[in-house]
Image (spheres, grey):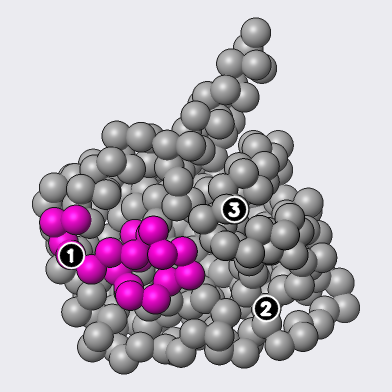
Amino acid sequence: MPDWRPLIVRREDGFPRIMGVLNITPDSFFEDSRTNDISETIKIANSMIQNGADWLDVGGESTRPGSNPVGEEEEISRVIPVIKELRREFPEIGISVDTRRAKVAELSLKEGADMINDISALGDKNMLTVIKESDCYICLMHMRGLPENMQNNPQYNDVVIDVREILNQKVKLLIDEGVSPERIIVDPGIGFGKSLQHNLSLLKSGREIVPMRDVGLMWGVSRKSMFSELLGRIETKDRLAGTLGIAAMSKAKGVDIIRVHDVGEHTDLFRAIAAMEEF
């Protein structure tokens, strides 16, 4: 497996790497991100790469609020053929698999995936073994509850301290098992068991949630429901401006990877900010 460390750290200009979202699902919350045809997926992936994506994140299970899990074999049938084809077509791109199942992760790594994006942060007891036996990267996301119930009045003593503590426990578990901190990324889990105020506090905190210097930070804010309450944008198709507003702060907050649906727009945003900084 290639060493994708250069695609983990922020770019030389200090902006985060861009991860494009590929939802191989019929029910992900943003309809325009869904695809179930391999040839169509390859076209979308190619467009993302041409528009500046460093990573592609492939998911076969919707984890939007209120969603129900799909069967393991169904998830496998959705993502494995896509990962195999992506690796064949784009040997230089970083590929992430968005899964909370160890078996899906293991099969994806065998077909060429480089990162496991685990929203359950090692919820599957076998995930740790998969990570230890490979040299993959692992993103641990904080989620309170499960997708089907996580938005039922989530409560925290102090959301930044609480999220950092949970992520620190997970990171320490990996490191104690021999995983290098440079292969670990954490994600505050915006919209996953969080109110609007929780989300804003976590975004404002930036790297305060990251347990140690060598661990990376990923944000996944793209078109999420927080923009419904914050901006009154009920439809996901109307949430791009809010998404870009948050992304504009990502460099200042020390974000290493930003997971987005709209790659070209984020590339343009970062280029425009960089031009203003250099002027």
Segment tinted magenta in the rendering: 22-40
Which tag, 1 or 3, sits closer to the chain's start? 1
- Vertical position of residue 259 compared to residue 70: above or below: above
Mark 1 Cα shell of 10 Å, populated few (<14), some (14-19), many (≥20): few
Q: Which residue is mark 2?
A: 193
Taking 121 as reference, is 22 left or right? left
Q: Nearer the viewer, mark 1 or mark 3?
A: 3
Query: Which mark is first along the chain, 1 or 2?
Result: 1
Q: Decide which of 89, 160 is in the foreground and name it.
A: 89
32 horizontally vs 86: left or right: right
Residue occupied by mark 3? 239
Residue 159: horizontal and vertical position, in percent? 80, 70
- Amino acid identity at mark 2: Gly
Q: Which sits in the foreground, 266 or 13?
A: 266
- State the quadrant of the C terminus: top right
Q: Quadrant of residue 221?
A: bottom right
